[in-house]
Image: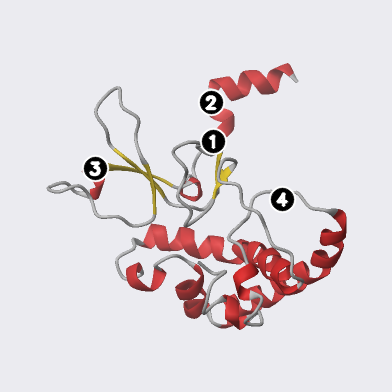
Amino acid sequence: VGTEKPFASRFLEAEAVPLAARCGGFHIFHREDLRRIAPLWIEYTRRVRAFAKAEPDAYMDESFQDWAAKKGTVSAADASVKRSQALWQAEMYGYAFAAASVGVSTIVRGDTMLYPGYVPSPLALPSILHYGTDFYLERQLPGTLPRGIFGEHAPAAGASREQSHIYFNKMALTSLDLFACAASSRRLERR
């Protein structure tokens, strides 16, 4: 979302905007590309963070999918989660804008990680769900596979979203204690 107009245009020349890819998580680089990207990655991250602090409403409206349309209907807890992810998200924009500005295109593989705004292929489901992304699974009959959905979608006829979908966002699991899980504790003890 933020790698498109109008947000990306605040930081990139018009010809570089199409090269900015929605990505995050991990990257595999050719070292010569990384030498060109790295200094600008830091610079663009600083510029994006400065913009986010100076104009937080514009930052949220332009860099989060459908934020302008739904910000009045989002719960205070969900809004807090989105705002807390805003500054660390700037680092991902820093990379995308730096790579685009030096002409390096990014290949995003849908079979490895599912990124915000991308629809998974039914032939190769991703192994990793990108953090900070809203995921919905349609509730299905027992024994059938649920369809994954990203973003805002209308619930099935006659059903509320809560009845027809299961919602998941790793950023919302703020009280999760991974060390309280029995399996995790046993693995840690073995090391």
Q: Are marks 1 and 2 in contact (CB under 8 Å)?
A: yes
Q: CA distance from mark 1 to mark 4?
A: 28 Å
Judge depth for marks 4 and 2 and give the one in front: 4
Q: Nearer the viewer, mark 1 or mark 4?
A: 4
Find disc 1 in the rendering and name its residue. 177
* Amino acid type, residue under disc 4 in the picture: His
How would you rate the neighbour count of disc 2 (Cα within 10 Å): few for under 14, some for 14-19, many for 20 or more?
Answer: few
Comes first in the chain, label 3 or label 1: 3
Q: Nearer the viewer, residue 116 or 131?
A: 116
Please state which of the two labelled residues, at mark 3 or mark 1, is closer to the viewer: 3
Residue 90, which numbered label?
none
Q: CA distance from mark 3 to mark 2?
A: 29 Å
Quadrant for residue 73, please give it.
Answer: bottom left
Residue sitting at x 72%, y 17%: 190
Closer to the chain start, of discs 3 and 2, is: 3
Q: What distance separates the C-alpha of mark 4 from that of mark 3?
A: 35 Å
Crowding at label 1, few (<14), some or many (≥20) Cα neighbours within 10 Å?
A: few
Task: Please identify the residue farthest to the left as the structure is shown.
Answer: 158
Report the amino acid beneath label 2.
Cys
Q: Position of residue 92 (x, y in %)?
A: 65, 62
- CA gap, disc 4 and disc 2: 30 Å
